[in-house]
């Protein structure tokens, strides 16, 4: 058995299901939200995870921080199984793996002052910070995320969206985590505030050696902050590898489409890009297509894609799950034509 | 001697619009002198962050402001030369049924949940064009087909909740374009959609706009979406237009420090990992607007007069206006002046 080095979060062949809708007595088979998914987050580095709504990225985040139970697979942290942890390890994990949520409005208790919200973790982990240090440490934490000490006495509704997100980050930092799962941390923020928050997250990673799993749908943001990228489609990773390789020379047709569809601010100043407009929308995870899950929208799809599901394999310095990755990578022009 | 070109009359011209709201914490100005125009067939993007007043602006144009809490204090709205702001709301309603159409961000609330989508569109033809039931239905199906809804004849019988988000937005667009308006106002039409679906909807809007020769006002906070479709852009900040002009001029040579700050805030795909240059601070509360230039508390080039004198929009190049005392310097990129704010 491999022993992962320090502060390394490893997800292996993870499967997450949820019960299908319907009545109390006639439940259908469970819906698989995440299937055979593997990834590694290392302290000091950022793994960016992109995918469209419904692809399972938030479900994955919640499972990693222990808010959901996986149906299969393993989660390892620091050489130990997370998903089978005993009480002592679970306590440690709830401190060392933290989460920053998307919505800075609903993720903070509106009835509590910031000083209470930030110290919540210390209430659960009594041994971590002695009570008499709380006030000083709170001020330190707020300063760390760029907030004035007075903010401690405010309620969330008295703060702007950007300030609230900083409070959410301070709360995550309070327990000195090693790994932080950021679920769409800037997507609710305005562009100018988003830039402040991204700079803050980058500084914290440098100074504290944090490892991020950075989940977002905005590709330019993910590319900006990530060392590695993973692209999810309908519960599976379709491509993953160094950010430069995946973003600059995507091999999976879905990654290509995703990157080409993201509008850039000054297209005339950027290098010419292919433009792929996919047909249709993401199928329901309750009834994924046979074979390759992307084939119903894929401009390169062949009969084989309906029969055999492609597994992740190494192509040009990244892992990609496509039978025709080489063809796609060579920039086959049949992809460039927008088909409607 | 060549005869001078005929004086161009904008399709929609808004001049010095001031709108105030009575809120729980007091009265505040949501719009503080908004001016812009749209020519026939042209696409204007109104770009701004939350609270900048972009949605209030178009709601004021469409006479959709809440009657009890909002008040238009000043300003004129002209549609094809006609001053609709001086006429009864009934006139704007007439225009918004036939000439001006609107698409909102949230397609679910724009549709009646208990009426089949085909029926909702057919209704427009029945009421406005007095078509027969049968004819109106056929036109509705054709409209759904035109916006790329597969199997339109069958889907017309479905209810809104049976459509996905992207398809529902297509239905809303089909409804908006049913009577072939001359102006389409789209308020964040793709914000709720995934990026691949957003690309489909933007392509659709572009195609339809070109086919119908329709003018469009696109309201968005997304600089990339603007670059994709707009001919001109108006940038709003704190209830006023701070800069407007041809897309590429405004993007390549912004003349207002706020526009410039926005451009710098966006991660550049070709320079990953480099530190971003955000705009410091946050937008002012409309309840306590700053004196002078509304941007001066966050402005890197602000000087003493910026705190006292509010700059008006003035021309910095052909068709390019900015409301900054130092627009010329900002535009040429002279960044040496740092105000002792």
Image (spheres, rainbow, N blue to C red):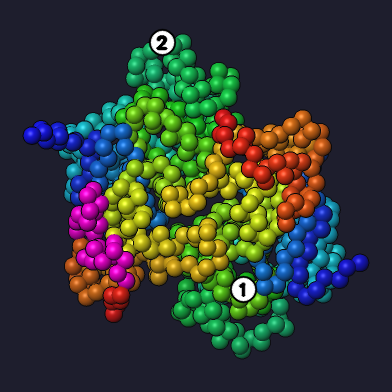
- Which residue was labeled with disc 2? B132
Q: From which residue to which does the magenta span run?
A: B312-335
Q: Residue at x 40, y 67 (%)?
A: B279
Q: Is residue B330 magenta?
A: yes
Q: Is residue A79 placed above or below B24 in the rendered structure? A: below
User: As drawn, which residue projects farthest toward the left?
Assistant: B1
Q: Is residue B33 magenta?
A: no
Q: Is residue B212 placed above or below A150 in the rendered structure? A: above
B38 with respect to B135 (left or right): left
Residue A232 visible in the current orientation: no
B286 with respect to A86 (left or right): left
Taking depth in this image into account, of B20 and B307 the one nearest to the observer is B307
Q: Nearer the viewer, mark 1 or mark 2?
A: 1
SS at mark 2 in the image: loop
How many badges with numbers are in the image? 2
Across and down, in percent, residue A263 comes to 49, 48
Q: Residue at x 59, y 21 (%)?
A: B151
Question: Are discs 1 and 2 located on one and the same chain?
Answer: no
Q: Chain of mark 1?
A: A
- Which residue was labeled with disc 1? A205
Q: Residue at x 53, y 27 (%)?
A: B148
B255 with respect to B47 (left or right): left
User: As drawn, which residue projects farthest toward the bottom?
Assistant: A132
Q: Quadrant of the C terminus of chain B?
A: bottom left
Residue B43 visible in the current orientation: yes
Q: Residue at x 51, y 80 (%)?
A: A143
């Amino acid at each position: 058995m491999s022993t992962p080095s320090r502060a390394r979060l490893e997800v292996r062949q993870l499967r997450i299901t949820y019960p299908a809708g319907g009545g109390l007595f006639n439940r259908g088979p469970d819906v698989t939200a995440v299937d055979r998914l593997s990834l590694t987050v290392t302290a000091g580095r950022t793994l960016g995870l992109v995918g469209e709504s419904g692809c399972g990225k938030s479900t994955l985040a919640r499972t990693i921080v222990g808010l959901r139970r996986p149906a299969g697979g393993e989660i390892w942290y620091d050489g130990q199984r997370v998903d089978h942890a005993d009480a002592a390890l679970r306590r440690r994990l709830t401190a060392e793996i933290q989460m920053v949520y998307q919505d800075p409005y609903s993720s903070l208790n509106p009835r509590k002052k910031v000083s209470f919200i930030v110290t919540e973790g210390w209430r659960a982990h009594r041994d971590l910070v002695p009570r008499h240090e709380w006030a000083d440490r709170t001020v330190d934490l707020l300063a760390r995320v760029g907030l004035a000490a007075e903010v401690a006495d405010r309620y969330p509704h008295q703060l702007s969206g950007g300030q609230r997100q900083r409070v959410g980050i301070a709360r995550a930092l309070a327990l000195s985590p090693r790994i932080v799962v950021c679920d769409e941390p800037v997507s609710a923020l305005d562009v100018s505030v988003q830039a402040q928050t991204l700079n803050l997250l980058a500084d914290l990673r440098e100074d504290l050696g944090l490892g991020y799993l950075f989940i977002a749908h905005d590709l330019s943001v993910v590319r900006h902050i990530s060392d590695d990228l993973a692209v999810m489609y309908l519960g599976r990773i379709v491509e993953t590898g160094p950010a430069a390789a995946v973003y600059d020379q995507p091999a999976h047709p879905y990654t290509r489409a995703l990157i080409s569809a993201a509008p850039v601010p000054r297209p005339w100043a950027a290098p010419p890009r292919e433009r792929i407009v996919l047909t249709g929308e993401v199928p329901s995870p309750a009834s994924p297509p046979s074979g390759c899950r992307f084939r119903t929208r894929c401009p390169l799809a062949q009969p084989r894609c309906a029969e055999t599901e492609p597994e992740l394999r190494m192509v040009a310095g990244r892992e990609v799950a496509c039978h025709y990755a080489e063809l796609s990578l060579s920039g086959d022009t049949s992809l460039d034509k927008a088909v409607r | 001697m060549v005869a001078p070109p005929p004086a161009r009359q904008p399709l929609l011209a808004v001049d010095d619009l001031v709108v105030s709201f009575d809120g729980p914490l007091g009265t505040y100005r949501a719009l503080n002198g908004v001016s812009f125009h749209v020519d026939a067939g042209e696409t204007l993007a109104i770009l701004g962050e939350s609270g900048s007043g972009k949605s209030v602006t178009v709601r004021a144009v469409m006479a959709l402001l809440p009657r009890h809490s909002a008040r238009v204090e000043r300003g004129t709205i002209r549609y094809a030369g006609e001053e609709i702001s001086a006429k009864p709301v009934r006139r704007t309603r007439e225009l918004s049924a036939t000439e001006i159409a609107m698409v909102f961000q949230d397609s679910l609330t724009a549709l009646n949940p208990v009426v089949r989508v085909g029926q909702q569109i057919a209704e427009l033809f029945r009421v406005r064009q007095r078509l027969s039931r049968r004819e109106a239905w056929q036109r509705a199906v054709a409209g759904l087909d035109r916006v790329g809804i597969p199997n339109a004849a069958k889907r017309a019988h479905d209810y809104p909740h049976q459509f996905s988000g992207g398809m529902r937005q297509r239905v809303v667009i089909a409804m908006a374009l049913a009577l072939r308006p001359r102006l389409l106002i789209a308020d964040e039409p793709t914000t709720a959609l995934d990026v691949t679906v957003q690309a489909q909807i933007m392509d659709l809007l572009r195609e339809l706009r070109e086919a119908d020769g329709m003018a469009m006002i696109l309201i968005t906070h997304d600089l990339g979406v603007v670059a994709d479709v707009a001919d001109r852009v108006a940038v709003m900040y704190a209830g006023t237009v701070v800069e407007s002009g041809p897309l590429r001029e405004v993007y390549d040579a912004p003349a207002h420090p706020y526009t410039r700050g926005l451009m710098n805030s966006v991660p550049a795909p070709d320079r990953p990992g480099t530190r971003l240059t955000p705009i410091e601070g946050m937008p002012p509360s409309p309840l306590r607007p700053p004196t002078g230039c509304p941007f001066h508390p966050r402005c890197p080039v602000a000087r003493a007069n910026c705190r006292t004198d509010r700059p008006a929009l003035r021309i910095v190049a052909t068709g390019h206006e900015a409301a900054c005392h130092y627009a010329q310097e900002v535009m040429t990129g002279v960044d040496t002046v740092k105000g002792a704010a």
